[in-house]
Image: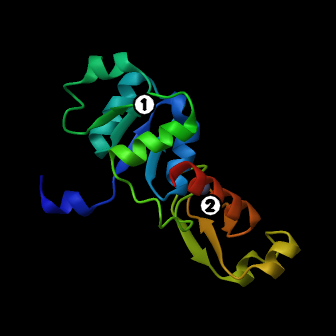
């Protein structure tokens, strides 16, 4: 494997069963494609075309498409609980879970970019605007994020789940 592949962050694609896992991996900053309307073949095709590791709960899917997936990588997710799913993915691929700083939209996978505080003045509740200095916006869906109490709860949950 070329050295450049070692350092580039891993990208994933998740099957329809893994919506919650998808959101938590995005919170950690990872690029995770997810389309609940995608059939198995389209899922595999996209994984191969975009060099994404396939995350699936479907053992038969992996068995059926094993040859096509051999260069892309795949992981059979064992648990039905998202906390254990996240632990499995983080452990298997040795993902960095310490430096999650609002970089990717959990809802749509878009990249978050920092925006000027004045730009959000009339787009967020006033108490949010007045209490926070740093804001980010999703480049795809436009949702605005800030490191508020919800963000603190998310961090706390991640600490509990991943240690
Ligand atoms: Zn978004």
Q: Is residue 131 visible?
A: yes
Where residue 127 appears, as percent x and y from the top left, is 87, 74
Q: Is residue 34 visible?
A: no
**Disc 2 target residue:** 155
Question: Badge 2 local density, few (<14 within 10 Å), some, or many (20+)?
Answer: some
**Above or below: residue 38 compared with residue 112:** above
User: Is 115 in front, or is 63?
Assistant: 63
On screen, residue 62 versus residue 148, left or right, reads left
Where residue 3 appears, as percent x and y from the top left, is 14, 61
User: Is 118 in front, or is 150?
Assistant: 150
Residue under the point 28% across and 18% down: 63
Mark on residue 77? 1
Residue under the point 85% across and 69% down: 125
Judged from the image, the quadrant occupied by ligand 1 is bottom right
Q: Residue furthest right?
A: 126
Where residue 18 appears, as percent x and y from the top left, is 52, 34
On screen, residue 130 versus residue 63, left or right, reads right
């Amino acid at each position: 494997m070329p050295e450049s592949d070692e350092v580039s962050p891993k990208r994933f694609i998740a099957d329809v069963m893994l919506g919650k896992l998808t959101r938590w991996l995005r919170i950690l900053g990872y690029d995770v494609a997810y389309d609940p309307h995608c059939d198995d073949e389209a899922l595999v095709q996209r994984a191969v075309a975009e060099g994404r590791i396939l995350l699936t709960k479907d053992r038969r899917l992996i068995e059926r498409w094993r040859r096509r997936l051999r260069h892309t990588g795949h992981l059979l997710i064992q648990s039905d609980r998202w906390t254990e799913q996240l632990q499995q993915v983080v452990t298997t691929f040795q993902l960095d879970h310490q430096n999650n700083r609002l970089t990717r939209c959990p809802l749509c996978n878009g990249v978050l970019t920092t925006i000027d505080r004045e730009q959000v003045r009339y787009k967020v509740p006033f108490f949010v605007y007045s209490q926070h200095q740093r804001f980010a916006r999703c480049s795809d869906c436009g949702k605005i994020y800030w490191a508020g109490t919800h963000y603190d709860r998310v961090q706390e949950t991640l600490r509990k789940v991943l240690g």
